[in-house]
Image (spheres, rainbow, N blue to C red):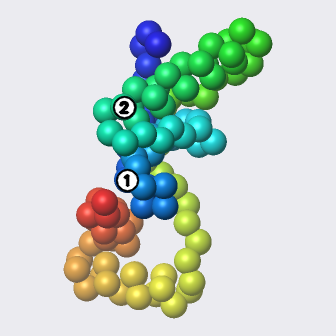
């Protein structure tokens, strides 16, 4: 597929005993094979077929995550006691709670 900008992942599937290929923009699709390279080729081929089908039926395509613009802002609800602890931790570190949480999230893999 020309200009394929979708997000792919190859993982080991213990339950299947082989590698699984996934595409973040098409979460219902997957491909299984014994070798990672084969899995990547397989899931990309499946996505290509689905994209062609969507285009033929004039249905919308999902926007690739790689081309989306993000504001850098998101809201999350937490328990009031956790909010208090985080505010205190930020104050003790001399930084805002937003900065504290941004630093914490940047270390998550």
Q: Quickly name the residue at label 1.
A: 12
User: Residue visible at 31% across and 60% down?
Assistant: 109
In the image, taking residue 72 as reference, residue 104 lies left or right, namely left
Task: Identify whether 26 is placed above or below 82.
Answer: above
Above or below: residue 33 compared with residue 56: below
**Above or below, comparing residue 68 to residue 45 in the picture:** below
Task: Tell me the residue at 40%/35% (across/down).
Answer: 39
Label 2 SS: helix
Q: Please tell me which residue is depicted at 59% across the width and 42% down the height of the picture.
A: 27
Number of numbered discs visible in the structure rendering: 2
Is residue 99 visible in the rendered image? The answer is: no
Residue 32, position as x, y percentages in the image: 47, 41
Q: Which numbered circle lies on residue 58?
A: none
Residue 91 screen position, x and y as percent: 30, 82
Side of 7 relative to 99 (left or right): right
**Label 1 CA crowd tier, 10 Å (few <14, some 14–19, many 20+):** some
Instruction: Pick whichever of labels 1 and 2 is earlier in the sequence.
Output: 1
* Disc 1, SS: strand
Q: Is residue 95 above or below residue 11?
A: below
Q: CA gap, disc 1 to disc 2? A: 13 Å
Residue 79 locus on image (x, y percent): 57, 84
Q: Residue at x 50, y 38 (%)?
A: 31
Q: Can residue 75 be seen in this view?
A: yes
Q: Mark 2 points at which residue?
A: 38
Q: Is residue 4 left or right of residue 27?
A: left
The x, y position of residue 104, in whole percent, is: 31, 68
User: Where, by quadrant of the figure, is residue 20 drawn?
Assistant: top left
Q: How crowded is mark 2: few (under 14 residues within 10 Å), some or many (20 or more)?
A: some
């Amino acid at each position: 597929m020309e200009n394929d900008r979708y997000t792919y992942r190859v993982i080991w599937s213990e339950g299947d005993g082989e590698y699984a290929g996934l595409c973040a923009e098409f979460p219902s699709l997957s491909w299984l094979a014994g070798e990672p390279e084969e899995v990547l080729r397989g899931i990309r081929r499946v996505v290509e077929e689905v994209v062609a089908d969507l285009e033929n039926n004039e249905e919308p395509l999902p926007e690739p995550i790689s081309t989306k613009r993000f504001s850098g802002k998101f809201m999350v609800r937490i328990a009031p006691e956790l909010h208090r602890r985080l505010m205190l931790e930020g104050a003790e570190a001399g930084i805002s709670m937003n900065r504290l949480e941004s630093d914490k999230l940047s270390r998550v893999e």
